[in-house]
Image (tube, rainbow, N blue to C red):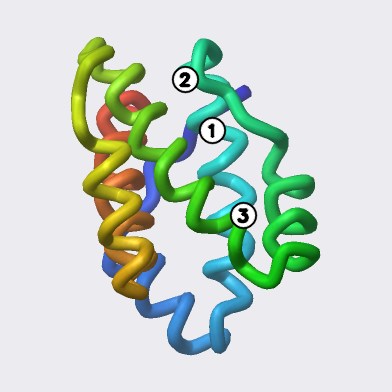
Amino acid sequence: MQIRNRSIPACVILSIVTLGIYGIYLFVVMTNETNALAPKNATTSGGKAVLLTLITFGIYSIYWNYKLGCKIDDMNGNSGGNTGLLYLIIGLVGFSIVNYCLAQSEINKFANA
């Protein structure tokens, strides 16, 4: 799987302009890319994650935020990190777009390598 370098400001602007549709696409792609970069903490595929989020009325996205942070820790070789907890708190407050930006920043490091 090819990991793409994405502009974080462009992702935020596109998410706003498309009324969240690009955010859903980013959710799917980010799930698949982090699964490829951190196979030890891999979750379901991006499509299944969106479906589970819809079926559970957003509850799965709370778990997804936590696991995203855990995968970021795994990608950086920090197995005992607290990034999962940080992402969980940010997601619970309602700022998941911040998690997208933070995670995309970390993914971009691996896309450039």
Could you tell me which residue is drawn at 61 percent across and 67 percent down? Answer: 58
Give the side of residue 103 with respect to residue 14, left or right.
Answer: left
Amino acid type at image mark 2: Leu
> Mark 3–mark 2 contact, CB under 8 Å?
no
For residue 48, above or below residue 45: below
**Residue at figure coordinates x 28%, y 68% from the top left:** 9
Q: Give left or right: position of 3 versus 94.
A: right
- Residues at discs 2 and 1 in contact (Cβ within 8 Å): yes
Cα separation, mark 3 vs mark 2, equals: 21 Å
Task: In this rendered view, identify the residue nearer to me: 72 or 36.
Answer: 72
Q: Where is residue 64 drawn, in percent x and y?
A: 52, 47
Could you tell me which secondary element the residue under label 2 belongs to? helix
- Describe the element under mark 3 as helix, strand or loop: helix
Q: Which mark is residue 37?
A: 2
Q: Residues within 10 Å of mark 1 (few under 14, many from 20)?
A: many
Which is more toward the observer, 12 or 56? 56
Looking at the image, is 37 positioned above or below residue 58?
Answer: above
- In space, the residues marked 3 and 1 are separated at their CA atoms by 18 Å
- Give the quarter of the image for residue 110: top left
Disc 1 secondary structure class = helix
- Few, some or many C-alpha atoms within 10 Å of disc 2 (few <14, some 14-19, many ≥20)? some
Q: Quadrant of the N terminus?
A: top right
Question: For the C terminus, which image quadrant?
Answer: top left
Where is residue 22 shown, x and y percent of the image? Answer: 57, 70
> Circle 1 is placed at which residue position?
33
Asked if residue 54 lies left or right of residue 93, the reply is right
Residue assigned mark 3:
60
* Front position among marks 3 and 2: 3
Q: Residue at x 34, y 46 (%)?
A: 104
Q: Which amino acid type is shown beneath numbered disc 1?
A: Glu
- Residue depicted at x 79% and y 64%: 55
Compute the Cα span from label 2 to label 1: 6 Å
